[in-house]
Amino acid sequence: MYIPRKWYELVFNLLSGRFREAKNRKLSFRCYGFSVIFHSTMQANELQQQFFNHLKSVLPPHISMVDELTELLNISYDSVYRRIRGEKPLALNEIRQICEHYHISLDQVLQLQTDTVVFRAPDINHDSLPFEDYLKGMLALLKHFNSFRQKKMLYFCKDMTFFHFFLFPEFAAFKTFFWIKTIQNDPAYSQKSFSLSEFPLEECFSIGQQIISEYNLIPSVELWNFESINSSISQIQFYRDSGMFARKEDFEVVVNSLEKTLDHLKLETEKGFKFMPGQSEVAYRASLQFYVNEVVLGSNTILLELDNIRHSFVTYNVLSYLISKDIRFNEKSFTNFNTILSRSILISGTGERERNKFFRSLKERVQNLRT
């Protein structure tokens, strides 16, 4: 077969490049073209290995990555292992399936150095999620946190921590009613006033209690401010002044319940542990480090470390939250939290004078609601 000279020269020039050494494998090729193929293959294998390592890191320890992928991709165990070993490349549709199912960002896996940070918004595709379902989603999230061996929560409070709203049924019912009527703007509540007998919202309280039980298993550092209770006080005051309590007794029972909430929180802070009201001393108690900063008001951001993997939960639209596992974003968030923490006062387990001062101030504001 006749081969044009210019084609021959082109192929010859391609295959006769300088000697190249494959540094990582101590192998060498005298052919430039083969070296490019080798390096491209090695780079693809390393990226695929990096992808699987990241996937393994986001799964709870008791979950088998191989079992998960076998079911998700509908392939055999052998096929999964060949992909993990790099013997078979992942198809684009397989990468998409895995990323969507486990909420993985390829930007993060590949460590692309851009100014883009990827967040996940769990309720972004729901126009109006019933509040009970919202609570169930939060409960599932807390259970997921507790599936990890090592866990720690940092809570930068703007308001009282969400979990404390469900310590006692009366205050829990009021907060739930407020969120449904005023924040979610549920039409069924538009002409309703708060009445504990009409709106006990017992199912939401039951789920809320389960949420607290899961939260109490996670060692936590909470950073509060003297203003952290203002939101709840303003809500009660607004309902009182607008005549949105059905009876004066409903107003009184909510204020009393808020006082009991603060009393329990003070007791937790004094002991340095989290527990349910009336819970036995023998029950497991996760540690609570409670700090107060008088000049910086938080943002209700929650930072988590789960088996050494960092996560950020940033609130928006009052009840919604964004989740990010971006390494750079979390590094800045954790650094900022710890910087403010170093300028704050620890009042849990120690600092009795400051602890009494803090909770006395909060109690006085609640009591002033009655005047």
Image (cartoon, rainbow, N blue to C red):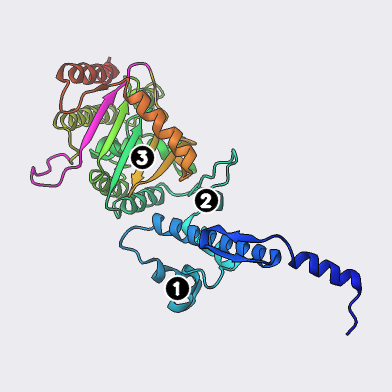
Measuring from the top left, give residue 57's x and y in whole percent. 39, 55
Where does the magenta region start and end?
276-295
Q: What residue type is labelled 1?
A: Tyr
Q: How crowded is mark 2: few (under 14 residues within 10 Å), some or many (20 or more)?
A: few
Q: Which of marks 2 and 3 is nearer the N terminus?
A: 2
* Residue at horizontal 19 percent and vertical 21 percent from the top: 355
Mark 2 or 1, which is nearer the eye? 1
* Residue at horizontal 52 percent and vertical 48 percent from the top: 108
Does the image show residue 89? yes
Q: What residue type is labelled 2?
A: His
Measuring from the top left, give residue 278's x and y in whole percent. 12, 40
Image quarter of residue 117: top right
Check disc 2 and report the residue beneath it. 126
Q: Quadrant of the C terminus?
A: top left
Q: Is residue 159 left or right of residue 16?
A: left
* Residue at horizontal 38 percent and vertical 37 percent from the top: 302
Return the residue nearer the eye: 158 or 28: 28
Instruction: Find the distance from the CA under tag 2 to the CA under tag 3.
Output: 19 Å
Q: Which of marks 3 and 1 is nearer the N terminus?
A: 1
Residue 176: numbered disc:
3
What is the secondary structure assignment of the residue under circle 3?
A: helix
Q: Which amino acid does label 3 sit on?
A: Thr
| Image height of 324 relative to 237, above or below | below
Check disc 1 and report the residue beneath it. 81
Instruction: Find the distance from the CA under tag 3 to the CA under tag 1.
Output: 48 Å
- The image shows a total of numbered marks equal to 3
What is the secondary structure assignment of the residue under circle 2?
A: loop
Instruction: Find the distance from the CA under tag 2 to the CA under tag 1.
Output: 37 Å
